[in-house]
Amino acid sequence: MEQLVRTLAPYSLRPAVLPGLREMTVGGAIAGLSGDSTSFAKGFFHDACLNFEVVLGDGSVVMASNENQFSDIFHAYPGTFGSLGILAAATIRLVRAEPYVAMRYCHFDDPSDLSEYLMGGKSRGVTFLEGIGFAPNSLVACEGIPATSAQATSGTVGEIQRLDRFLDPSFKKLVAGKRGGMSEGGEMPGEFLSLEDYLFRHDKRVSRTRKLRSVLGSLLARTPDQSKILLQAFMVPAPNVASFMRNLEQRLSIWPLWFCPVSNCGRPPPIFSIPEKAGDFIAIAVAGAPTAKVFDMEEDNRAMERELLLHNGRKVHLSTAFYPMELFYGQIYDGNLYADLREKYRAEEAFPHVWEKIVGLLEEDE
């Protein structure tokens, strides 16, 4: 994604939706369902793609789009982790870009209020929108609009804040430092971020760790015990977010959290995404060690999977999953449609099916 952003910058262009990890590939963003702070208006990254060139199981190649005879695989392909074919190319929708983003922040002490605010972004005319939760009563909406160089140097919103240098703060720390004394719904001081700093604002820690390891070598070679970490992304229909959050807090209590509102764009959704009739939703990214109890990797993941289904939500399958195959294909997702497409596009003998990729490998490891 970093290469894509830097290639487009001289033309004052950017992708309509851009997952904010520098080393993420276009294929990975499509295969795994990826979004970011423009998703409240534009949907996932794949929703901003016009066509996919897919290599099928027999070696033939199709150019699939919403408007041709391969529209079924075009709509189904995102989120299948390459199990219908190999993505060779994609045409991505671009939009005009300014060199800076003018930031604004708003504090909330209740998940219901944050959820309502995030889902109202279109009516406020903002371009970028997300939320960060630091505690059950400390939730921040972060929104931005494009800004020219002249606007950024005028000081009308605030100073230019850099995030790219080694000692610059991470975006999370920048936002956390603004919370003191803010009342419910109160605005916080903003600033200007360069477009690249903004688009990769959550990649600071990755870059910093990489640089530190290059200097300190083995001193930072140790990684946390992954069995103590919950790493998930839950897609929850917007009206159900507050209830789901209460259950997550009561069972595990993990902070901070990232909230990404996503527009359900109206065209046929991928098989392994949120239900078409669920409306707009919020993706809640969870990454950390639970503090409410001793964390049991399997038991607690299974419990949150059950809770998610009760709230008509679905996972972004970026990490551990424990769904039984019968539940996965029989009730959560349309396994019959998926099987028909695998047969039609000759994937069965060439590619593992998606359950094997996101659940089955875990069972093999055991």
Image (cartoon, rainbow, N blue to C red):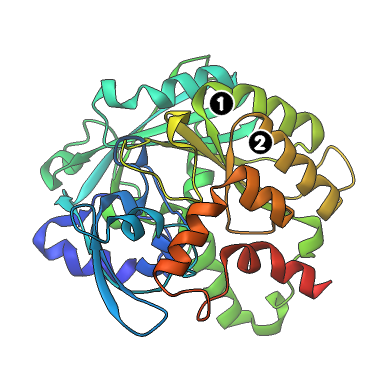
So how many labels did they put on this image? 2
Q: Residues within 10 Å of mark 2 (few under 14, many from 20)?
A: few
* Disc 1 crowd, CA 10 A, few/some/many (<14, 14-19, 20+): few
In this view, the residue in front, 58 or 301, is: 58
* Residue 191 quadrant: top left
* Mark with earlier residue (2, 1): 1
The kind of secondary structure element at disc 1 is: loop
The foreground one among 139 and 303 is: 303
Q: Amino acid at mark 2?
A: Leu
The amino acid type, in three-letter code, at marker 1 is Gly
How far apart are the alpha carbons under marks 2 and 1? 36 Å
Residue 58 position in % (x across, y down): 39, 83
Residue 125 is situated, as x and y percent measured from the top left of the image, at: 23, 26
Location of residue 266 with respect to 52 vertically, above or below: above
Foreground label between 2 and 1: 2
Identify whether 183 is placed above or below 362: above
Quarter the N terminus occupies:
bottom left
Viewer can see residue 262 = yes
Q: Is residue 208 above or below residue 217?
A: above
Q: Position of residue 168 (x, y in %)?
A: 45, 56
> What secondary structure is marked by label 2?
helix
Q: Residue at x 55, y 34 (%)?
A: 236
> Residue 355 at x, y = what percent?
63, 62
In the picture of the structure, the residue carrying the numbered disc 1 is: 180
Q: Tell me which residue sits at (78%, 46%) in the image.
A: 302
122 sits left or right of 321 in the view: left
Residue 179: in sight, yes or no?
no
Query: In the image, 241: left or right of 83?
Result: right
What is the quadrant of the C terminus in the image? bottom right
Residue beneath the point at 39% across and 29% down? 189
Front-lying residue, 100 or 131: 131
Q: Which residue is mark 2?
A: 309
